[in-house]
């Protein structure tokens, strides 16, 4: 082997033109900065105390449950109402009329009045009203086959089949987490940074975790009601079981409406990756062994994955690519070289050597695992994430300056062909009957109000009018003449200098693949595993797959819970 040295260049965050391609965004994998992993790290670090204080459910699954959640500085309660599953009325859609569980996350201890108010109001859904201290209303349904198989096994005194569980990896699936003012719930901005759930998505994430715990408690409770021989789930299985999650096109609207939050989260991830690539490691550094172990864990996880992916790379392909990276890391651990190279920044060389050859999901898996080598830096970056939604006009900026800003930061939008026949093929609208986001052929729904943000068309139209105006004209004067551009001007000015806020795509075009941005939200930002895709627009996956149980949290959990292997009982 010929050993060469690479010139020293300090690794920097990846350019936005690379990161913000929808196909690349879709490949981003869960990391320490993703919602479920970050929140679970917080609960582990602070040793949250979660306990069941009421489980009044009969053998038909009808009843009420209450959980107490004690963070270091605050207490919360989860109130759940269990129902017998309906084979006909239950649905995962927001127009459903029956769910297997409905519940509420509230601040403070649950009083009888709180429980009764939730009992009467939550089933009304859109006509119901939450109490002032309610953070989340939620709904979930069983995975009927797996839940029933697990119930039968426990009632017979045995553990359920790992092979059966691993086909979906959950007993119940989240079908709705509503908050931030919806139904009268408390708005998230009002919580403040010092609130125990004041971080991004934390109220929803806690509720999803409690859904997981409720599903396991329920199946054990029903098994005990059914048989004196019943046993509880093995702790290894309780950790392996997550909570299912289904998502669709509405998440694309989220990406467009919260560009500052998207930018903050992606920028934090890219900064953390760059920090890891800047580590000066030698072959004996313990972090090298740690990374090898993490890659091996990811390989096993992928090799055991039984999900079928329609649009994205299979787990078998990802596992095969990760094996190549593992071999390169073993070389470094053994000889101090990466693919024959010695370098000041070996992890940067590792990424550079493989980024053109690995399938995107495999590359993004490695980048996510690198973040685990800089935990303090990653956590500091995440703590600083803020995403206010308000946009403001800078009225004194000149037309000439605004044109320069557009050329500097939106060349991709100016270069997008918006004149072709397919540029506006689709329209985004909300179903009148189901109130669900839809994407339809414009010719089939000609009267639909387009709810999607036409970034490319809007910027091109704005640029054309700016180009016909006096360069010295103030933006305030320009907008008096062209008020139709007010929102786009405010957006461009407010996002100045931020690199990762807007996907590089025309979402109305035929070439746009909706599932790409849905997967960004589900996988990269929420941290959902095993996201199976349907019709390039819907995803189903698993939250808290492998996560510690409340007993683990109280005991002071230490370990790596993500990328769980199938339990060996």
Image (tube, helix red, strand yellow):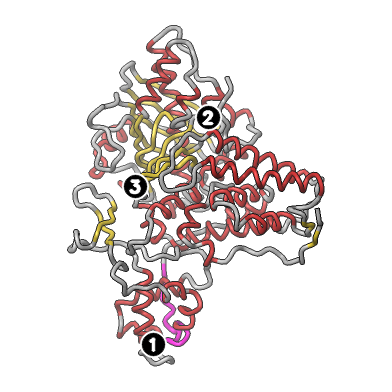
> Residue 558 occupies which quadrant of the picture?
top right
Q: Viewer-proximal residue, 7 or 569?
A: 7
> Residue 236 occupies which quadrant of the picture?
top right
Q: Which residue is mark 3?
A: 535
Residues at circles 1 and 2 in contact by the CB criterion of under 8 Å: no
Q: Position of residue 340 (x, y in %)?
A: 77, 54
Can I make out residue 179 in this image?
A: yes
Q: Viewer-proximal residue, 327 or 529?
A: 327
Residue pictured at 49% horizontal, 50% vertical: 525
Can I make out residue 287 in this image?
A: no
- Number of numbered discs: 3
Q: Position of residue 317 (x, y in %)?
A: 54, 44
Q: Dividing the image into 4 quarters, which one contains the C terminus?
A: top right
Residue pictured at 34% horizontal, 73% vertical: 418
Q: Which residue is mark 1?
A: 467
Q: Secondary structure at mark 3?
A: loop
Q: Secondary structure at mark 2?
A: helix
Which residues lie in the magenta part?
391-402
Q: How far apart are the two marked residues, 1 and 2, measured between alpha carbons? A: 59 Å
């Amino acid at each position: 082997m010929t050993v060469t040295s690479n010139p020293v260049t300090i690794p920097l965050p990846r350019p936005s033109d690379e990161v913000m391609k929808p196909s690349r965004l879709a490949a981003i994998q869960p990391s320490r900065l993703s919602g479920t992993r970050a929140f679970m790290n917080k609960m582990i670090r602070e040793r949250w105390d979660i306990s069941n204080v009421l489980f009044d459910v009969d053998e038909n699954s009808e009843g009420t449950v209450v959980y107490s959640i004690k963070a270091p500085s605050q207490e919360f309660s989860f109130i759940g109402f269990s129902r017998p599953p309906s084979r006909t009325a239950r649905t995962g859609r927001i127009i459903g009329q029956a769910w297997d569980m409905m519940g509420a996350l509230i601040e403070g201890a649950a009083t009888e009045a709180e429980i009764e108010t939730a009992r009467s109001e939550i089933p009304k859904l859109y006509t119901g009203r939450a109490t002032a201290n309610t953070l989340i209303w939620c709904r979930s349904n069983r995975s009927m086959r797996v839940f029933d198989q697990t119930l039968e096994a426990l009632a017979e005194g045995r553990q359920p089949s790992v092979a059966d569980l691993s086909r979906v990896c959950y007993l119940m699936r989240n079908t709705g987490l509503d908050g931030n003012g919806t139904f009268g719930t408390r708005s998230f901005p009002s919580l403040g940074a010092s609130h125990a759930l004041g971080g991004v998505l934390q109220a929803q994430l806690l509720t999803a975790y409690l859904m997981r715990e409720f599903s396991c408690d329920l199946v054990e409770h029903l098994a005990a009601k059914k048989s004196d021989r019943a046993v509880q789930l093995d702790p290894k299985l309780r950790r392996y079981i997550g909570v299912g999650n289904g998502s669709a096109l509405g998440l694309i609207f989220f990406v467009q409406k919260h560009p500052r939050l998207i930018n903050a989260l992606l920028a934090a991830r890219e900064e953390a990756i760059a920090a890891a690539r800047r580590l000066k490691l030698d072959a004996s550094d313990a972090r090298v062994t740690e990374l090898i172990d993490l890659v091996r864990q990811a390989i096993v996880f992928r090799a055991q994955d039984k999900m079928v992916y329609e649009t994205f790379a299979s787990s078998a392909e990802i596992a095969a690519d990760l094996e190549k990276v593992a071999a390169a890391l073993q070389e470094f651990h053994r000889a101090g070289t990466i693919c024959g190279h010695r370098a000041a920044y070996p992890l940067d060389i590792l990424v550079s050597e493989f980024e053109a050859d690995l399938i995107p999901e495999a590359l993004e898996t490695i980048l996510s695992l690198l973040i685990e080598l800089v935990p303090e830096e990653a956590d500091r970056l995440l703590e600083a994430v803020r995403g206010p939604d308000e946009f403001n006009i800078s009225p004194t900026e000149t037309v000439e300056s605004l044109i320069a800003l557009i050329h500097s930061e939106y060349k991709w939008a100016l270069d997008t062909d918006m004149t072709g026949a397919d540029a506006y093929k689709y329209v985004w609208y909300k179903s009148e009957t189901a109130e669900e986001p839809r994407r339809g052929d414009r010719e089939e729904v000609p009267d639909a109000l387009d709810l999607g943000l036409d970034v490319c068309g809007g910027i091109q139209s704005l640029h054309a009018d700016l180009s016909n105006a006096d360069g010295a004209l103030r933006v305030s004067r320009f907008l008096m003449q062209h008020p139709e551009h007010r929102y786009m001007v405010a957006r461009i000015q407010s996002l100045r200098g931020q690199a990762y806020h807007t996907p590089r795509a025309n979402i109305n075009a035929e070439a746009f693949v909706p599932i790409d941005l849905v997967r960004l939200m589900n996988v990269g930002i929420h941290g959902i595993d095993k996201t199976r895709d349907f019709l390039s627009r819907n995803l189903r996956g698993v939250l808290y797959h492998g996560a510690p149980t409340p007993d683990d949290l109280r005991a002071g959990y230490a370990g790596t819970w993500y990328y769980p292997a199938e339990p060996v009982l």
